[in-house]
Image (spheres, rainbow, N blue to C red):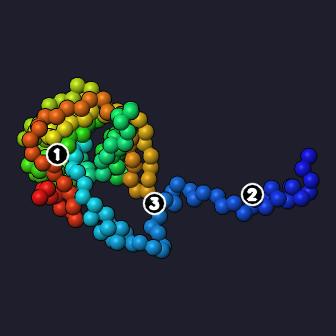
């Protein structure tokens, strides 16, 4: 059995080791350091590719409904196995939908598809059914989600993990299919709050 000195040492460690902050504290605005505006301005200097994340909601209406969301926080994570990651705002329609539906799709948009990116990024927008109305799409065999015609690449994905990070959720997914509808054109990019073309 440990002596009195050993017990005191253990008690000291237990009382002086700070507990990790609760997960809910991660979304609390920081009191010191960089402000939200400074952080947003700094990250706007990071050029990003633009994708359309899509999913099919089979429970919305008699034939279901297609849902789309423009995203710039999308990246590859792993080659073996092939994994990608997308960041979704907590409580958004796409976040709620992908929490229930495991398979979804991504279309990497070209510079000529700026209108598609803008349409699916609107706040207070109309029904997604109307947004898809004149967008040429095929339906993914694995996901059933719309794949934009003429996109630089399309991916069908299955969610492997969801990680809450502040006011967003990071969705890590395995790539099930990859295709290249268009070999022409340059990528659509997002820089300093605007869609851009590569010079």
Q: Which element type, helix, strand or loop, lies under badge 3?
A: helix
> Residue 150's spot in the image, x, y percent?
10, 39
Q: Are the residues tagged 3 and 2 within 8 Å (C-beta)?
A: no
**Residue at label 1?**
109
Q: Which element type, helix, strand or loop, lies under badge 2?
A: helix
* In-front residue for pair 127/166: 166
The disc, 3 or 2, on the residue closer to the chain's N-terminal end is 2
> Residue 55's spot in the image, x, y percent?
26, 37
The disc, 1 or 2, on the residue closer to the chain's N-terminal end is 2
Cα separation, mark 3 vs mark 2, equals 27 Å
The disc, 1 or 3, on the residue closer to the chain's N-terminal end is 3
Image: 128 above or below 190: above
* In-front residue for pair 51/93: 51
> Residue 136's spot in the image, x, y percent?
9, 37
Cα separation, mark 1 vs mark 3, equals 31 Å
Residue 74 visible in the displayed image? yes
| Nearer mark to the viewer, of 3 and 2 | 2
Q: Which element type, helix, strand or loop, lies under badge 1?
A: loop
Crowding at dot 1, Cα within 10 Å, few <14 / some 14-19 / many 20+, comes out as many
**Residue at label 2?**
14
Left or right of 32 on screen, residue 113:
left
**Residue at label 3?**
27
Question: Which residue shows up at 45% across the image and 60% down it?
Answer: 27
Cα separation, mark 1 vs mark 2, equals 53 Å
Q: Quadrant of residue 171?
A: top left
Residue 59 visible in the displayed image? no
Image: 186 above or below 167: above
């Amino acid at each position: 059995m440990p002596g009195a000195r050993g017990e005191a040492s253990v008690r000291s460690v237990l009382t002086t080791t700070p507990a990790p902050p609760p997960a809910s504290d991660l979304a609390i605005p920081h009191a010191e350091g960089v402000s939200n505006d400074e952080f947003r301005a700094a990250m706007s200097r990071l050029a990003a590719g633009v994708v359309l994340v899509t999913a099919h909601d089979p429970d919305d209406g008699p034939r279901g409904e297609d849902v789309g969301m423009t995203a710039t926080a999308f990246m590859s994570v792993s080659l073996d196995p092939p994994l990608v990651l997308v960041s979704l705002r907590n409580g958004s329609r796409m976040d709620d939908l992908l929490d229930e539906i495991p398979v979804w799709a991504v279309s990497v948009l070209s510079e000529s598809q700026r209108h598609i990116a803008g349409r699916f990024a609107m706040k207070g927008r109309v029904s997604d059914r109307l947004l898809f109305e004149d967008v040429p799409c095929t339906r993914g065999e694995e996901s059933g989600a719309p794949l934009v015609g003429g996109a630089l690449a399309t991916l069908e994905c299955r969610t492997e993990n969801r990680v809450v990070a502040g006011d967003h959720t990071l969705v890590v997914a395995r790539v099930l299919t990859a295709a290249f509808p268009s070999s022409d054109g340059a990528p659509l990019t997002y820089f300093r709050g605007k869609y851009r073309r590569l010079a």
